[in-house]
Amino acid sequence: MTTLGVLMMAYGTPRSLDEVEAYYTDIRRGRKPSPAELADLVRRYEAIGGVSPLREITERQAKAVEHVLNAQGETAFRVYLGMKHTEPRIADAVADMRRDGIERAIALVLAPHYSAMSVGTYHEQAREAARDGGPQLYCVNQWHLEPRFLHALAARVEEALRLCKSPEQAMVIFTAHSLPARILDMGDPYVDQLRESGEAVAKRLGLAHYTFGWQSAGRTQEPWLGPDLLEILESLAKEGYREVVVCSQGFVADHLEVLYDIDIEAKKRAEELGIQLVRTRQMNDDPDFVRAVADVIERAKRDAGW
């Protein structure tokens, strides 16, 4: 039986505080952070326990998806994990596939919504690595409307609302990682896709109060997409809201942007404003999410004619 490869790509995270500077430098395309910038990032990691759980979660996601795919028995799948900013790199994963004799592979980023500045850059790295010697890649651009993904997202919003004293009056804020605002002039689908998945969840649950916002913007001179989550909390407080549910739909695992930016920074601001903030559980390697990703890969296999 021929084995079909799956190139599962993720952002990556430092494995210890000693790796933070190299990681930050990689994100900044080789520009080292200033001592103050580095100290601030280290402080954030220390606040969540010294290291992000993202690496372990991503590894568990990959293993779980491979298990579900192979349980079908029709095709043999092998999942290879490639990180954008840490080891193992995307190019390393492609080289491993080639070494193992993988001739065809589905390339998937663990981010449901497409942007040329995010998912697109992963695919560029993968295609470049496979240019000489393969494997042949079928790249999945987006999967934000995958039925099982929307079901999992809706279930988490519903669960979070049950933790509110007055769920029918709580505001649900769908968030995602901000990107430079210039994507709006590029015809990039990122903003529209985030609204599509959020609207789909809101329709499923019959939400009366929901909005969209951004978080974790980069610290650069150019404008980033807004409004920021902290700004939205301030506006909601003025409007009289006392409970909010934050659904970070653009993320699929617990990591710094969730555990610090929402659980610490945003919750602190909410408390100062007299608002109770409840965050939806992340997908991590929960079976419902794993099955959703497997569905995406199986559909891609059919679309590719493999």
Image (cartoon, grey):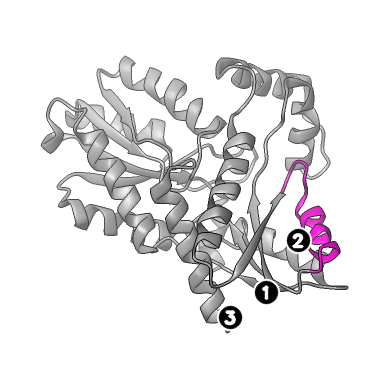
Q: Quadrant location of residue 256?
A: top right
Q: Residue at x 18, y 34 (%)?
A: 170
- The picture places residue 84, in percent across and down from the top left corner, at 71, 49
Pointer 2 residue? 125
- The picture places residue 199, in percent across and down from the top left corner, at 28, 57
Q: Residue at x 43, y 42 (%)?
A: 286
- The picture places residue 64, in percent across and down from the top left corner, at 54, 48
Q: Amino acid at mark 3?
A: Ala
Which mark lies nearer to you, 3 or 1?
A: 1
For the N terminus, give its image quadrant: bottom right
Q: Is residue 137 magenta?
A: no
Q: Amino acid at mark 2?
A: Gln
For the C terminus, give its image quadrant: bottom right
Pointer 1 residue? 1
- Mark 3 falls on what kind of element? helix
Residue 304 has which mark? 3
Q: CA distance from mark 1 to mark 2?
A: 29 Å
Q: Nearer the viewer, residue 182 or 289?
A: 289
Highlighted range, magenta: 84-101
Return the residue found at the far bottom: 305
